Amino acid sequence: MDEATFASWSLKIGLTGLIIFLGFIIWDLGKKSQAGKLGMFILFLVLGLGIFGFIFKNVLVEFFVLSK
C-alpha cells in the first residue's frame, strides 16, 4: 500500500469517526441541557446541516474541480 492510498483511507475513516463523534456530542449536549424532543430535533437539524454542508462541499469539489 502506497502513501497516497493510506492517506485516502485514513482520511475517510477519520472523518467518518469524527462525524459519528460529533453526533454523540450533539446528543449529549441535548441530554444534559434537558432540551426535550423539539430542542433535540433543532440541535440535530442545525448542527447536522453544518456537517452536511461540509460533506456536500467536498462532493462538489471532487465532482467539478477534480474531474477535469
Image (cartoon, rainbow, N blue to C red):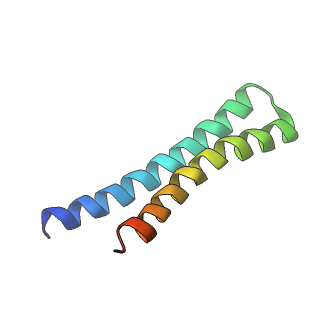
Who is closer to the viewer here, 50 or 7? 50
Q: Can you tell which quarter of the image residue 8 is in?
A: bottom left
Residue sitting at the far top: 33
Relative to residue 32, is residue 24 depicted above or below? Answer: below
Q: Is residue 31 left or right of residue 9?
A: right
Who is closer to the viewer here, 20 or 56? 56
Pinpoint residue 59: horizontal percent, then vertical percent. 48, 64
Q: Residue at the spot x=79%, y=41% of the render?
A: 42
Pinpoint residue 16: horizontal percent, then vertical percent. 46, 55
Q: Can you tell which quarter of the image residue 43 is in?
A: top right
Q: Is residue 10 left or right of residue 17?
A: left
Relative to residue 54, is residue 26 depicted above or below? Answer: above
Pinpoint residue 53: horizontal percent, then vertical percent. 58, 51
Relative to residue 4, is residue 27 depicted above or below? Answer: above
Relative to residue 54, is residue 25 depicted above or below? Answer: above
Pinpoint residue 63: horizontal percent, then vertical percent. 44, 70
Q: Residue at the spot x=87%, y=40% of the render?
A: 38
